[in-house]
Amino acid sequence: LCKEWDSPIYVFFKPLPSIEYVDARKAHVFKCGARQCHSQHRLVPQFLDKSAAKSTSNLRRHAKVCWGVEAVAAADATQDVNTACNALANHKKIDGSITAMFRHIGKGTVTYSHCQHMRAEAHAEFVRWICENNQPFQIVNDREFCCLMKTGRPEYYIPSAETLSCDVKNVFVRVRKHISTMLKEYNGKLSFATNAWTSPNHKAYVTITVHLENHGQPLSMLLDLVDV
């Protein structure tokens, strides 16, 4: 039967299953290949009844819970169990996204990594999330937020509000220097614009923006906001 296991879904499980009887039904019992299985049961039966002998629904259901829907879809896109197996083996040697490894062969969409963030990566993701979504630094101390982040992976690192505040300030300084250098070295034309308005609390503001073409794409950046 091993020769018939040509579906990429098998790469998420140990190669040699055990033969057991589950509820009086003979089955191959596969063991999840993840280091930390996120499902309630690490062992998954594939029943050998004539009607279910070639069904991989149980394996597929488990893999989606443990490895993620995107990883399963990316593995399916390789359309070959050996190729998907090689991609998974290479993934274990480096710190990267499992779906990214499959994508080199198939056409799957990369979204999330099966690996947890390293501390440096966590800092970067938190800074981006805080800035892009206007979140307060103290949100990392919120009980429900911590519950969402740590349930199932209690060791996940969450930086403190004070650390995030310092990170955002450091990123701002570096980005400001980068933008300054980029504008000074830009060979094309730069278009500057201003806008002024009065807020509902009767405070007047003026913004200064720059507009340019970057690699064929229009780019607009806010340079300053002045309280007048």
Image (cartoon, rainbow, N blue to C red):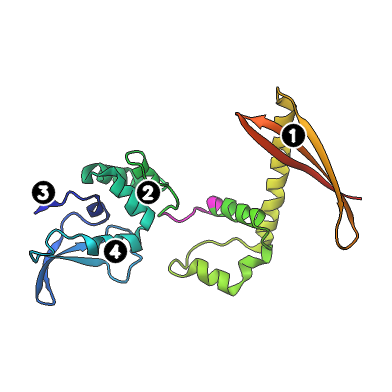
Residue 126 higher or lower than 178, as above or below: below
Residue 71 visible (yes or no): yes
Residue plotted at (40% across, 55% down): 114
- Marks 3 and 2, how far apart at CA: 25 Å
In the image, taking residue 54 as reference, residue 33 lies left or right, namely: right
The image shows residue 17 at horizontal and vertical percentages of 15, 60
For label 2, the SS is: helix
Residue plotted at (86% across, 62% down): 200
- Marks 4 and 1, how far apart at CA: 50 Å
- Marks 3 and 1, how far apart at CA: 61 Å
Q: Amino acid at mark 2?
A: Ile
In the image, taking residue 44 as reference, residue 210 lies left or right, namely: right
Residue labelled with disc 4 = 62
Residue labelled with disc 1 = 180
Residue labelled with disc 2 = 98
Q: Nearer the viewer, residue 26 or 142?
A: 26
- Start-end of magenta stretch: 115-121
Going from N to C along the chain, the mark reached first, 3 or 2, is 3
- Marks 4 and 3, how far apart at CA: 22 Å
For label 3, the SS is: helix
